[in-house]
Every structure is written in structure tokens, then in C-alpha cells.
């Protein structure tokens, strides 16, 4: 036997040992990488057919008002314009809302924010639609408006919605905080504030609608085709089967593309398409996108925390207020996640939390990576840091003393078990950052350049948790040439998760990912699989894909056994070879197996479905298990501050995340790098500002996201794997978590470098310098004791 | 008449409907006539169409003129530098055009060509307000010229914004220092993106204070106080007037020390 | 709306295109010539997603009026698909997971190719500067930088 052959046989034997873990942990190239590096025309705006007309949305120019009248004649008469659509043109329901039915597609009589859409100009070209839209005059009766969520919370505040300004309330009641405070030696009360963040996917929102078969085909940039289908069907008054929605390759999402904006653009395009019987493109330019799509909720979070003098957390009482802007959108769930994470990754025996999602007349907020986690964790991790200082304890030491480890209980009273990988994450970053040595060294700095380290710990409840049924569906079929076609309503928009999910299937089936192909998510072909949000594709979709692959394998193994005259238990499929595990030279190729299956009429289509176990919790006390598993993480950042100007850079990042099982480590790292940098933007420079309800900086010249010159020169990322109960092979979610910790870690690092506490994001150079100036004018405080 | 060279400033404003010119006169093809960087007889000349990349790569801007490399390298990003012109920078007349303070610190004058012929005007007099210049109708900016710095001179540049690249300066300062043989200040030009109001200008009171003095910690601190009283900055969403003034003071000190050190080092 | 004819060399072929006055180079490339690799992210020159090469220089195609392109040479990703350096860069991007949503990828590849032409084995700082005008929201840039470093190295393509 030649050397090559024996090596091959040995390799097959070894692969047989791996079982379904065959390709797990491999950096297999994503299925969609090639089309991207080749610049293929696969995004929505690349698919516009000849003869397409354009719909340009126009929106309110007052933050709160009654619409008295609209002068549309000038616009309608503009060259190239076919018409102007308003609420009167809606045959079905004038509604475009993701959760609560509090938002219209086209405002009929009231506008509650400057993002409220009034209608759309439809024209032969985008330029004439835009020119005409600029000529529309709307007459408003301005109403008083509220822009501060705390003002909105007051009982005498003007009502933004008929049912009042609190869209949702939540609470946690664990133990007895008064008792906890009475036993505390130190109590600290502080308030933290976070800002509006814009998701800034590089491709703005857009939809293309084409009349088809008495119905409509919609192609768009989105996260949830089935939700978009339902929304469009409602507006058009068509049965859902008449509305076919296809997700085109999507250039980034981060949340807003799972909220109302895709409904808005797709419904508008569809309305115009039905009316004019032509393909219609409705897209947002960057400015419109930044005004109209949902942002991250700004929060005001107050903590009162009690701790013993030796550093044990006894009680925490928090009031959490989230500004959901004019409409609730996904805010009703953002507030839930924020509340459950109010004490972060720590054990506190007595917890009281009251949270309020309030309406204001700012532009509305909704889903954005992290979904309430970044805000909640910023507050608690800052509070932890302040408490440590007050106690004269090292902040890491304080964290180690109180953090959740197996055996401790969370804010909801859930017992952490062996799947809690937080200690391992902490160990990695403490070592990597050379934490203890540097902290000692930085205690004695002179000169105007100061360095500091900041830490933050993460607990992030996985998947939808308490938000509803958490399921995924994946359809798999093997074609006659051996290609495995995967179809699902779950969408890819950059995370690589769908490829990861397919890698699970590939591993279970034993066939390389290169033999797989992904169908574009299409509501006419793929069953509803829930929204692609909450980082759930690998964990929930992966389980569904696992099942589908297993089911397919079960159909093929008996045939293979028959063909090879081998017992079923001994049949292995690996690398596209079907063989006897005890004697790998007894084998046939995958292709031959499939063609034989076809010849015999063996069905090769399977549907995998997975629903996560229910996450029960008590509405009155917030106690229970709202999440079935958690992703854990630890971050240490090092900053270098020019104390003369307050300007600083993050010079080092040390990040460790317990992802349970890294299906594709390169993909996991991609999420860690990308999420961390987006989190650094949130920490340092991003701020979508409103003034009197108008977005001040809806453009990329004045809204700053990190460039390649802003990323830390040192970034050490560690993947920790402590298997969890939910995902395939113990996998936990990773797409959202890395955005959470940078803000508090940076804030704490700046504090340690300069003595300045910045309690509202972003931590700008001005706040650092002005904070130092304020400190200089108050009595001298010594540095905290070692 | 609206002139377009690169469009990096004009096109975004047209898209935002801030301006709607019916005619654009494109001068970008006059490369031979208007795109050059030359030094001769102690005068440095930049054709108005010289791009920021031309400035970054020019061998003329070394040593005492390395400020132009520094400032160009911090301006925009590669794709912007490749097309943005020095003339466009100057004619935009806003506080976000970093080269204006640099040219002011270098004591630049502008050659304008029009129907009535040529004229030379100091840069400082050319910028009359936000987006307002002393350009006459049917004139274009042809050249930016300045004298090569005298011996015992150095010019430095600092800017600060919200991130490291591609940012609108909150504060940018160009400082040109010239010393006598005994190292007292012979002349100083202190140019900022904003002094009083929202346009680039020279901080003349601070300049006058410095002339004739020997630089020490004390005189620098006094100069900072003069600058702070001379600045009448406004607050906006990017930053407060107080912060901008503090940063300007820091830049003044840094640049005085840096220029002084360079001149002494070369002496 | 005034119309004019612009003649330019795009990816090695001369094209005469009738454009409307306000059309930009990106409109000529995408709409008139079907070169969809050129993407629009902001329309104001702040994101670099539309970057192409004009007369050998990387420029934002959303900031160049079509009327200014007469007689110029433009190069997009489509024109470099057979170029060995580009192929090496593309393979490196795939191997290093540098394309996530892919929207910045063509611009990043154009900037990388431009850098590879000018520099043999660029440093991390040189790479960062070369892509400093192109925003990426997905990757955090690290894997892109690794891809470019590997893709620019001498040796086997």
C-alpha cells in the first residue's frame, strides 16, 4: 500500500473518532466570502431592473404636532413624478410597528417625532423624487414636546400616546434591600447616563418591490423576511402568500433592520408597485437612515448600592429609565433585558429594580446590538468601580470577590452551574494584560501622559430568553449531484452565523461545507424561523441544522450499510467519503451514495426544527430563569491619556469570552474584534444628538465611528469554551456580547489614569479634561489605598 | 459663478441642498497652469490645484516647512487628499479647513486671476467670514505664495477632534516662530481655526505680546492668558467654548516650546 | 437637467456615456456601466465605500462629478479580477475572514491593491493609513489588516 493511501486511511480513522465534531473548531471559509471579494452584484441596489421607478419617503419637520394640511400639488407636478403616496393610499392597515401597534406607516393626523413618515413621492428617477419631496409643504399645529425621559415619567407630563408615556414597566424584587442597606458599611448612590447610538451599517435600508402573479415580490436589506412579509401584507391588505419577501445579501444590520424600517421601505415600495404596476425601489440615503431607523435607547440608570467594609455586595436598588422615543418598537424587550442585567455578573443577595420604558418626542429607539445590555452593564460596572474606590480596594479584587461563579445566584435568583465560564475569562485577561504589575506601576506616574487599566465583566443572557418563543427552522435537501442545499428564514448580514450554522450541519453530515449551498431566504420557500436577532443563529438555528443533518444522515446510513455490507453503527461519513470505521478502505464516495439514493427513490429532504425550552420567570418579582444559558466575558483595557487636553487612546485590549464551543474560531474572533471596536465607538466617540427633537448629526462627517487609525494597537482576544446546555456542542452566543464591555472598561481605565469619573457616555476628551478641572477646584483627595 | 475643482466640499453641500448652483465652472482640467509646488528665490508657490497628496509628497516641504507635510497627513483620508486642492481649502473659508491656519501662519498671500487681471492679496484679508471670501465675481484663486521662512524660524501644527483620523477639528493651530540672534522673539504668527467667531484667523494680540520677549515658562504662561482673553469662541454640539479655549492654550504652549526647541536645536 | 457626453476609459475600455449634469462618477460606473462592485454608503465622501482608482489614484467616486471625468481612466474591482496581485489579496481576505457583510470589501480591496503597487511588505501603520478613509462597521479592521499584510507579501501568489 502506498504511503499516500495509508496516510489517507489513517486520516479517515482519526476523523471517524471525532464523530459529529468533525468540522467544529475549524476555520472553514465562509460560504459567502467569495461573492464578496469578487464584488458580485448581490445587494438590493444591485438588483434594480430596467423600468424601475423610485419612491422617496418624506418625514415630519416638527417633533410633535397635528397635521393640518399637506400641499402636494407642486410635488405632483414636478417633472418625472408619477404621484405622491399618503395614508389615503393604504388599502389595508396603516400600521408599521414591530411589537406594540403604536405606529403608523404614514402619519395621518399626528406626528410624534421628526422621524415620522408622512408619505412617499414616486418618480421616474431618484433625483426627481428627491427634488419633488423637497418641495412638499406641510402645515402643522405644533404641540408641546418632551425630549427628556425623566420629564416624560412625571405624572403631570403631557401624554405622547393616549395610554400614557410609560410603554412598559418591569421590576425585580429579590430579598430585602432595606435589610441589606441596614447591614451595609458603605452605601453609594450614583446616576449614569448613556447616549443614542446609531447602528451605522454601511449599507442603509432599502427595498425593491416587483408586481408578480397578482401579488408582490419584495427584495430587501433586512434581518427578518417573514416579519417584513407580515407587515407588507397588512398594509397592502393581501394574504401573506401573495407577498413574497426575499432577503438580498445585506450590508450590515446590527438591529435596526429587524425593526420597523424594512417594513417602511418595503411596504412603501410595494404600495407604489401595486399602484403603478412597475418595479419600485425605495431606499434611504445615509441621512434619512440615521434620522428614521431605530437607535440604541439612551438610559438614565441610578444605583444605590450597599457593601460591607470588607467588600461584599449586600444590596442594590436601581431605577432604570429608557427613552424609547416616539414609538416603542423593540423597546418593550430592551427594557426587559436591561432590567435582568441590572447587577451584571455579580451576586447580590438583595436586589430591587424598577424600570420604565418611556415615550418622548425624540426619534424612536429599538434594537441595537446588545439590546439594553450595554446600558445596564455600563451602569453597574461603573458603580462597581466607584464602590471599590470608596472602599480603598483594588477594583479587580472587588470584582473577584463578588462575581458570579458556579454555585452563586443571579439577580433573578437563578443558580449558576458549571457552565459559568466567567472565572476562566477573568484569568485569561488578567494574565494577558499583566494587570497587577501595571496597576502597581501606574500608581506612581508623573508627567502629563498617564496610563490606566480598566476592567469590566460580562454576563449576557442567551437568545430571546423571556421575549417569546425561541425557535428556528432549517430545511435541507440533497440534490442529485450531491450538493446539499440549505434553506432557512434565518438571515446572514455579516456575522457569519449562517455559515457557522451550516458548518454544524456539515460536521454532523460529514460532508465539507464547500458542498453546501445556501438559498436566499425567501418567504415563499422557507418556513418562518423567528427573527434573526439576539445572536441566536448558531445556538438556535444551529440546533435545527443539527437535527436536519442528523435526519438526512439517518436516511443515508442504512443505504450505505447495505452498499458496503457493513453494520450501520460502523458507517462513518467524513470529508465526503462513506466508509467502515474499522476498515476505512471499505468505502464509496458521497456522490455515489447520493446517486444510488436517487436511483432508489430515497427522499433526501429534511426539516430540522428546534425550540428552546421555556424560560419561566415571575412578572411581579423578576425571579426565575429568564435565560437558559449565559455568555460570559471579561475585558481589560489600557488607556493612555494626555491630561493636558483630556484626549486619550485605548492602547491595549484584552478580551476573553466564554462561547461554550467555537464552531468557527476565525468567525468568533471576527465578532470579538468587530463588536469590541463598535463598543469602543460607543465608549469614546459615538453620539447621535437630538436638539429639540431634530437629529443634529445624521451624517458620517459628524457622527464618528472608529476608523482603522482608532483601533488599539494591541488586541489580545481569547476564546474560552465551557459548554452550555442550549447550543449545538455546547455553543453560546457571541455576536452581541463583545459590544457591551468596552464602555465601562474604558470609563474605568480613564478613571484609574486620571481620577476623573465620567458618568455619561461617551467618554470624550472634553469630559475628561473638564472633569479634571472640576476635581482640581475641590478639596484634595488622596489616591485610593492599595 | 461657482467654481469646482475637486468637489469634496461642494458636492456634499449640493446633496444636502445647502446650495443649488445652476452653473458649475470646472477648473480641474487646468493641471499644467494651476497644479504645481515650486520654490525659487525664497518664495514658495503652490498652484491652486495642487492636491493635499501633492503637498504630502512634495520634497519642498521639509525642515522648516515640514508643517505642510504634518498638516496634510492629518487632513481627511487618502481618497480625499488625492483630490482635495489647496485652493479649494482656502476658498471654502471654514474652520474645518486645516490648511488655512497653516498658510496664515506662513504669512501666505493669494494670487487671484480675473477678468480685470491679476492681484495679490494677503490670505488673512481674503477670509472675511464663514464661507465668505473677498473673491470678486469672475475671479479664481490661482496661487498661494509665501516667503521661505527666515533663519531661526520654525512652524508647527496641532489639531484635536473626536477621533484620530477624518475628523473636523475642534481646535487646530499653526504657529510660526522666528527668533533673533539672542533668541528673543523676532516675530510670531499664531493662527487658529477659530479665534473670534467661526472662521480661521490670526491671534494678533497674542502675537504682539510675544514679539521682543524671551520665551520662558513665565512668558509662555502669560501668552496663554493673553490668548484666552483674545479668543471668543462659541460652543456647539462638537465642544464647548471653554474646552476649546483650554485646548488652544495647551497648543500654544506646546507649539511655542516645540518651535523654540527646533530653532535652538538647529542653531 | 442638462445632458452631456463623457468619454472615459473604464477598466481598459473606452466608453462614451450620456450623463445628466448632477450625475457623479459612481452613477456612471454603477448605473450606466453596470459596475456594481462600487457601493454607496453615504454620498458625502465620509465613508470611502465608493472608492475607485481614477488616473491611478484612489478617490471617492461619490465626490467626482461625471462631467469632470472626460478623458480620465477609472479602474474598479471588476477591472482587476484577473490581476495576480488582486487575486492574492482576495484569497487572503477569504482565508482571514476579512469580509463580513462585504459592503466595504471592494473599496478595501481597491485600497489594498493600490498599496501593494506602491509598497512591498507594508507595515501595519502603512496599511492602517491606506485604509484609514474606508469605514468598516463589522470587522473592527483587524482581520482586514492581517489580510492585506499577507496579501502584499512577496513570494508565491
Image: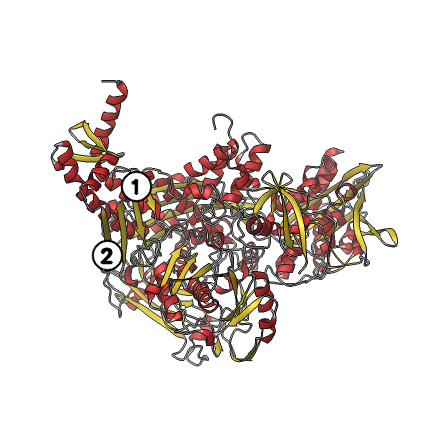
Q: Earlier in the sequence, mark 2 or mark 1?
A: 1
Q: Relative to A453, is A589 on the left or the right?
A: left
Residue A611 image label: 2
Seen in the picture, residue A342 relative to B36 is either above or below; the reply is below
Seen in the picture, residue B205 relative to C14 is either above or below; the reply is below
Report which quarter residue C92 is drawn in: top left
Q: Relative to B182, is A214 on the left or the right?
A: left
Crowding at dot 2, Cα within 10 Å, few <14 / some 14-19 / many 20+, comes out as some
| Mark in front: 2 vs 1 | 1
Asked whether residue C52 appears in the rendered view, the answer is yes
Q: Percent from the top left, x then y, of residue C72?
A: 66, 42
Determine the secondary structure under disc 1: loop
Q: Chain of mark 1?
A: A
The verdict on a common chain for dots 2 and 1 is yes
Residue at which label 1 appears: A483
Q: Percent from the top left, x then y, of residue A231?
A: 38, 66
Residue B27 image label: none
Q: Percent from the top left, x then y, of residue C129?
A: 57, 41
Rendered-image quadrant of the N terminus of chain A: top left
Please tell me which residue is depicted at 55% across the width and 71% down the height of the picture: A692
Q: Percent from the top left, x then y, of residue C32?
A: 58, 50
Crowding at dot 1, Cα within 10 Å, few <14 / some 14-19 / many 20+, comes out as some
Asked whether residue A401 appears in the rendered view, the answer is no
Amino acid at each position: 500500500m502506498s504511503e499516500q493511501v495509508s496516510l489517507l486511511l489513517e486520516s479517515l480513522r482519526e476523523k471517524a473518532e471525532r464523530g459529529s465534531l468533525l468540522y467544529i473548531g475549524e476555520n472553514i471559509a465562509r460560504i459567502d466570502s467569495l461573492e464578496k471579494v469578487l464584488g458580485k452584484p448581490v445587494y438590493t441596489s444591485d438588483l434594480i431592473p430596467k423600468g424601475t421607478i423610485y419612491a422617496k419617503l418624506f418625514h415630519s419637520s416638527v417633533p410633535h404636532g397635528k397635521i393640518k394640511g399637506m400641499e402636494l400639488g407642486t410635488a405632483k407636478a414636478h417633472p418625472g413624478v408619477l404621484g405622491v403616496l399618503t395614508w389615503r393610499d393604504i388599502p389595508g392597515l396603516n400600521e408599521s410597528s414591530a411589537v406594540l401597534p403604536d405606529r403608523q406607516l404614514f402619519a395621518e393626523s399626528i406626528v410624534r417625532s421628526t422621524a415620522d413618515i408622512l408619505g412617499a413621492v414616486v418618480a421616474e428617477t431618484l433625483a426627481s423624487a428627491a427634488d419633488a419631496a423637497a418641495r412638499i409643504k406641510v402645515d402643522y399645529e405644533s404641540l408641546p414636546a418632551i425630549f427628556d425621559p425623566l420629564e416624560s415619567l412625571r405624572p403631570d407630563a403631557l401624554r405622547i400616546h393616549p395610554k400614557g408615556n410609560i410603554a412598559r414597566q418591569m421590576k425585580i424584587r429579590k430579598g430585602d434591600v432595606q435589610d441589606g442597606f441596614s447591614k451595609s458599611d458603605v452605601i453609594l448612590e450614583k446616576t449614569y447616563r448613556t447616549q443614542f447610538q446609531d447602528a451605522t451599517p454601511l449599507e442603509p435600508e432599502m427595498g425593491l418591490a416587483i408586481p408578480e402573479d397578482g401579488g408582490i415580490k419584495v427584495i430587501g436589506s433586512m434581518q427578518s423576511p417573514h416579519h417584513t412579509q407580515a407587515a407588507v401584507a397588512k398594509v397592502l391588505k393581501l394574504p401573506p402568500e401573495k407577498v413574497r419577501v426575499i432577503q438580498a445579501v445585506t450590508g450590515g444590520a446590527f438591529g435596526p433592520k429587524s425593526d420597523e424600517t424594512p417594513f417602511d421601505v418595503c411596504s412603501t415600495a410595494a404600495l407604489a408597485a401595486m399602484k403603478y404596476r412597475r418595479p419600485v425601489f425605495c431606499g434611504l440615503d445615509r441621512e434619512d437612515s440615521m434620522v428614521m431607523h431605530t437607535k440604541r435607547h439612551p438610559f438614565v440608570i441610578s444605583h444605590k448600592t450597599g457593601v460591607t467594609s470588607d467588600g461584599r455586595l449586600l444590596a442594590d436598588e436601581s431605577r432604570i429609565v429608557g427613552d424609547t422615543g416616539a414609538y416603542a418598537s423593540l423597546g418593550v424587550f430592551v427594557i426587559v433585558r436591561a432590567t435582568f442585567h441590572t447587577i451584571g455578573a455579580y451576586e447580590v443577595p438583595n436586589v430591587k429594580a424598577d424600570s420604565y420604558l418611556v415615550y418622548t418626542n425624540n426619534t424612536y429607539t429599538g434594537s441595537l446590538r446588545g439590546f439594553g445590555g450595554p446600558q445596564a452593564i455600563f451602569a453597574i460596572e461603573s458603580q462597581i468601580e466607584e464602590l471599590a474606590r470608596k472602599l480603598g480596594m483594588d477594583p479587580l479584587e472587588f470584582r473577584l470577590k463578588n462575581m458570579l461563579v458556579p454555585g452563586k445566584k443571579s439577580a433573578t435568583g437563578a443558580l449558576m452551574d458549571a457552565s459559568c465560564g466567567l472565572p476562566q475569562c477573568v484569568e485569561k485577561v488578567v494574565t494577558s494584560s499583566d494587570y497587577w504589575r501595571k496597576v502597581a506601576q501606574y500608581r506612581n506616574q508623573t508627567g502629563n501622559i498617564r496610563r490606566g487599566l480598566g476592567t469590566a465583566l460580562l454576563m449576557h443572557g442567551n437568545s430571546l430568553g423571556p421575549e417569546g418563543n425561541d425557535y428556528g427552522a432549517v430545511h435541507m435537501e440533497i440534490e442529485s449531484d450531491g450538493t446539499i442545499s440549505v434553506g432557512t428564514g434565518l438571515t446572514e448580514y455579516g456575522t457569519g452565523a449562517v455559515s457557522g450554522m451550516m458548518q454544524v450541519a456539515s460536521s454532523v453530515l460529514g460532508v465539507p461545507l464547500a458542498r453546501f449551498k445556501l438559498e436566499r431566504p425567501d418567504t415563499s420557500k422557507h418556513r418562518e424561523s423567528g427573527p434573526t436577532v439576539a445572536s441566536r443563529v448558531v445556538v438556535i438555528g444551529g440546533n435545527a441544522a443539527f437535527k436536519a443533518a442528523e435526519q438526512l444522515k439517518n436516511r443515508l446510513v442504512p443505504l450505505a450499510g447495505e452498499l458496503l455490507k457493513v453494520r450501520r453503527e460502523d458507517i462513518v461519513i467524513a470529508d465526503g467519503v462513506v466508509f467502515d470505521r474499522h476498515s476505512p478502505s471499505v468505502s464509496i464516495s458521497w456522490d455515489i451514495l447520493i446517486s444510488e439514493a436517487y436511483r432508489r427513490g430515497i427522499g433526501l429532504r429534511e426539516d430540522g426544527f428546534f425550540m428552546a425550552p421555556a424560560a419561566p420567570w415571575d412578572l411581579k418579582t423578576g425571579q426565575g430563569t429568564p435565560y437558559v444559558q449565559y455568555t460570559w466575558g471579561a475585558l481589560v483595557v489600557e488607556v493612555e491619556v494626555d491630561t493636558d487636553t483630556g484626549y486619550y487612546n485605548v492602547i491595549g485590549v484584552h478580551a476573553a469570552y466564554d462561547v461554550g464551543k467555537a464552531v468557527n474560531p476565525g468567525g468568533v474572533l471576527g465578532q470579538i474584534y468587530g463588536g469590541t471596536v463598535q463598543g469602543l465607538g460607543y465608549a469614546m466617540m459615538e453620539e447621535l444628538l437630538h436638539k429639540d427633537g431634530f437629529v443634529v448629526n445624521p451624517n458620517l462627517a459628524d457622527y464618528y465611528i472608529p476608523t482603522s487609525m482608532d483601533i488599539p494597537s494591541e488586541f489580545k482576544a481569547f476564546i474560552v469554551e465551557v459548554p452550555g446546555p442550549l447550543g449545538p456542542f455546547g455553543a453560546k452566543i457571541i455576536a452581541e456580547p463583545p459590544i457591551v464591555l468596552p464602555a465601562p472598561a474604558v470609563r474605568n481605565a480613564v478613571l484609574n489614569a486620571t481620577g476623573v469619573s465620567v458618568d455619561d457616555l461617551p467618554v470624550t476628551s472634553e469630559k475628561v479634561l473638564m472633569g479634571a478641572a472640576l476635581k482640581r477646584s475641590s478639596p484634595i483627595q488622596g489616591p485610593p489605598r492599595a | 459663478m461657482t467654481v469646482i475643482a475637486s468637489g469634496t466640499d461642494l458636492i456634499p453641500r449640493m446633496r444636502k441642498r445647502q446650495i443649488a448652483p445652476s452653473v458649475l465652472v470646472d477648473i480641474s482640467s487646468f493641471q499644467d497652469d494651476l497644479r504645481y509646488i515650486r520654490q525659487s528665490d525664497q518664495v514658495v508657490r503652490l498652484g491652486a490645484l495642487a492636491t493635499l497628496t501633492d503637498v504630502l509628497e512634495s520634497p519642498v516641504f521639509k525642515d522648516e516647512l515640514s508643517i505642510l507635510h504634518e498638516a496634510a497627513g492629518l487632513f481627511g483620508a487618502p481618497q480625499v487628499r488625492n483630490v482635495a486642492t489647496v485652493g479649494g481649502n482656502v476658498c471654502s473659508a471654514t474652520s474645518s479647513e486645516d490648511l488655512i491656519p497653516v498658510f496664515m501662519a506662513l504669512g501666505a498671500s493669494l494670487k487671484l486671476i480675473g477678468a480685470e487681471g491679476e492681484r495679490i492679496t494677503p490670505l488673512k484679508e481674503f477670509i472675511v467670514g464663514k464661507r465668505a471670501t473677498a473673491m470678486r465675481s469672475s475671479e479664481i484663486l490661482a496661487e498661494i505664495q509665501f516667503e521661505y521662512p527666515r533663519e531661526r524660524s520654525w512652524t508647527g501644527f496641532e489639531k484635536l477632534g473626536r477621533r484620530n483620523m477624518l475628523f473636523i477639528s475642534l481646535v487646530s493651530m499653526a504657529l510660526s516662530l522666528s527668533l533673533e540672534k539672542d533668541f528673543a522673539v523676532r516675530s510670531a504668527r499664531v493662527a487658529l481655526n477659530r479665534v473670534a467667531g467661526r472662521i480661521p484667523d490670526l491671534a494678533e494680540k497674542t502675537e504682539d505680546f510675544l514679539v521682543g520677549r524671551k520665551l520662558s515658562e513665565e512668558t509662555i504662561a502669560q501668552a496663554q492668558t493673553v490668548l484666552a482673553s483674545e479668543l471668543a469662541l462659541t460652543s456647539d454640539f462638537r465642544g464647548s467654548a471653554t474646552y476649546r479655549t483650554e485646548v488652544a492654550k495647551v497648543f500654544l504652549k506646546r507649539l511655542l516650546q516645540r518651535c523654540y526647541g527646533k530653532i535652538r536645536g538647529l542653531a | 437637467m442638462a445632458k452631456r457626453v463623457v468619454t472615459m476609459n473604464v477598466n481598459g475600455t473606452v466608453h462614451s456615456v450620456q450623463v445628466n449634469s448632477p450625475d457623479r462618477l459612481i452613477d456612471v460606473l454603477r448605473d450606466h456601466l453596470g459596475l456594481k462592485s462600487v457601493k454607496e454608503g453615504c454620498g458625502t465622501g465620509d465613508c470611502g465605500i465608493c472608492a475607485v482608482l481614477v488616473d491611478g489614484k484612489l478617490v471617492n467616486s461619490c465626490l467626482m462629478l461625471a462631467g469632470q471625468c472626460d478623458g480620465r481612466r477609472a479602474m474598479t474591482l471588476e477591472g482587476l479580477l484577473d490581476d495576480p496581485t488582486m487575486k492574492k489579496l482576495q484569497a487572503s481576505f477569504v482565508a482571514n475572514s476579512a469580509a463580513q457583510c462585504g459592503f466595504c470589501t471592494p473599496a478595501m480591496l481597491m485600497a489594498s491593491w493600490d498599496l501593494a503597487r506602491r509598497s512591498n511588505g507594508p507595515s501595519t501603520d502603512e496599511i492602517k493609513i491606506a485604509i484609514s478613509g474606508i469605514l468598516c462597521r463589522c470587522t473592527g479592521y483587524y482581520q482586514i489588516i492581517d489580510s492585506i499584510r499577507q496579501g502584499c507579501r512577496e513570494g508565491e501568489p
